[in-house]
Image: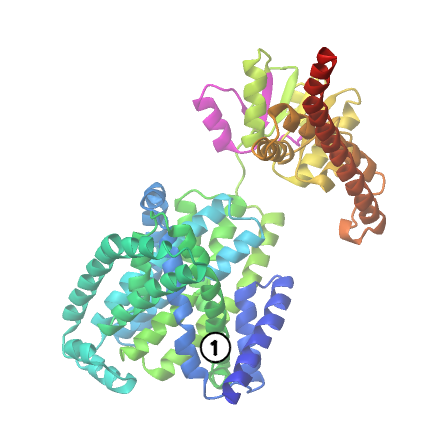
Amino acid sequence: MESFLFYATLYLIAMVVAVPLATRAGLGSVLGYLLAGILIGPVTGLSGTEMTDLQHFAEFGVVMMLFLIGLELQPRALWAMRDKLIGLGGLQVAITMTLVTGIVMAMGEDIRVALALGMVMSLSSTAIVLQTLNEKRLMQTAGGRSAFAVLLTQDIAVIPMLALMPLLALPGARAVAKADHGTHVVGQLIDSLPGWGVTLITLAAVALTVLMGHYLIRPLFRFVQTAKLREINTAMALLIVVGIASLMNLVGLSPALGTFLAGVVLADSEFKHELESDIEPFKGLLMGLFFITVGAGINFDVIVAQPWDIAGLVILLVALKSAVLYGLSRLFKLRGSDRSLFTLSLAQAGEFGFVLVSFAVVQRILPTPLAEKVLVVIALSMLITPLLFILHDQIARFARTDKAPDPDDIDEHQPVIIAGVGRFGQVVNRLVTMSGLRTTVIDNDLRTIQLMRTFGFKGYFGDPTRPDLLAAAGIAEASVLVVALDGRDKTTELVRYARRIRPDLHIIARARDRTHVFDLYKAGANDIVREMFDSSLRAGRYVLENSGLSEFEAAELEKLFFNLDRAAVRDLAQVWKPGVPVEQNAAYIARTKELNAELEAAMMEQYRRRDAKEDDDHESPGTLEGGQDA
């Protein structure tokens, strides 16, 4: 027990110290876990003999991750992405696997080993790439969406890879593996089966899992829900994952296979979101533990003994995958920074490679010395991923290789110019045009402009911040400019430029948040609309209306809050300091507290007047009757 508590404390300290530091440095949480593992393992030697047993336990985090991925794979969403999943993702996996297999065979390895390594190296790191794309806000770009499609294809491809891996094992290898790793009664029934027999059992287990998901798990979850206890719901979610994983393990299959399929089956169920919220904390903790054990398990003796070989293999892997991805990006017409993002973000190996390598060792496909070298190559390729994203940032900033489409020729001047026609700009444009006014719409997203034209709205492709395009659109004669661009800095830049060349122009701008309001106010915007403010006010009014207030009273309170908040923003603009975070501006914080107190007092005064009016309404009939009686 003392030893367990010591190692538990050690790993938890490594998590809570290394991961926040790595995240703040822009390396991402996964690399933080890996570095923490390297620190407590090869560097300091603090990890002991418990590493192997702990890694088997931590691998259950991968099982849970696959279950959650399956929950997100609704059939309709998959069908909508079919072109990229089958085309882009499928080609990436197939081409990379083929090239790696050929190179490994050219190095003198057996075809079984070559195919296994081809599968391993065709995968990229879902955890690192998705987290980095989200942190850098690149997920909604064309390159980010394409990278996500490939990662999704790779995650799905892990399942058939795990199912097909036993076919690569030599006859009798499974029996030897079972002798080394232990066996059980059910497992003995398939020990002597050939590879094709194991694959048939896999397919049968898949069918059984699907049937259980449809006809057993849902009714069982409904039964558990009647207890109305959160801990029982959590226990049920764990039972689904652990039970299916145990079932697959009993017949000698990968637990990840069964849980992934169970997730897909339950993706459309009414319990999906509850399952996600119950499993997510366990998955996150176990995945973190898994990556720490991977980092701690890296054999630095291999690196020291063969430094140039390891470095050469890492460079070869990244270069090969980059070449494949670059070719696919051209084939699927990705341009400029989207092409470099797609190419560089997926050029590493992935965390599921660790799972496949471990499985291949158990199946006696990969010898242990080669597996150790492969694990080091995978880990090092993941560790350099932040450098690849930095390289993309530099390419996107200074070296755009593809010329963007030429902007449209604007052949009309209208009194209203709308710069940016996303969800916000579209509503503004529809309201204005359907009220009888004419607009000139400019947006630098060609697809958005083409979609507008499909529905009968006229728009021009081009960058609204370019002075020549604004001049062509008639900025000199326009009466109103609506700035609804996605980029915060571009919005401020356009407002500042328009105010400089047209002091009399009425400028309406969309702001991201309150501090952006201050930027736009200083830049010269007349009307500033916080993008979520009005919709939030409406939602708050609905709350008041359904909490005992009349529609009139709720509307009056909404109007009061709106006016007071706008006045507060104007007041705070006087103490706001550009470039200084608001949490570091003492005057701003103090004035905010004062204004919040004043706002609360004004709202409560409105409530007091309402209550007083209700009391008067209740008392006046009695007084009237008393007068008549007198």
Image position of 546 with respect to 401: above or below: above
Residue 245's quadrant in the figure? Answer: bottom left
Give whichever of 277, 555 is nearer the camera: 555
Quadrant of the image for the C terminus? top right
Please give the residue where the numbered disc 1 appears in the rendered image: 293
In the rendered structure, does residue 218 fall within the stretch colored magenta? no
Q: How is the image coloured?
A: rainbow
- Please report the bounds of the magenta region as a residue range: 439-466
Q: Where does residue 541 sit, x and y in percent of width and height? A: 61, 31
**Residue at the image position 22 percent from the left and 76 percent from the top:** 169
Residue 496 can be seen in this image: no
Residue 179's quadrant in the figure? Answer: bottom left
Q: Where does residue 562 sit, x and y in percent of width and height? A: 71, 30
Q: Is residue 23 left or right of residue 274?
A: right
Q: Residues within 10 Å of mark 1 (few under 14, many from 20)?
A: many
In the rendered structure, does residue 440 fall within the stretch colored magenta? yes
Q: Where does residue 437 sit, x and y in percent of width and height? A: 60, 12
Q: Where does residue 309 sit, x and y in percent of width and height? A: 46, 78
Q: Amino acid at mark 1?
A: Thr
Element type at mark 1 = helix
Residue 337 can be seen in this image: yes
Q: Is residue 156 left or right of residue 566?
A: left
Number of disc labels: 1
Image position of 51 with respect to 148: above or below: below
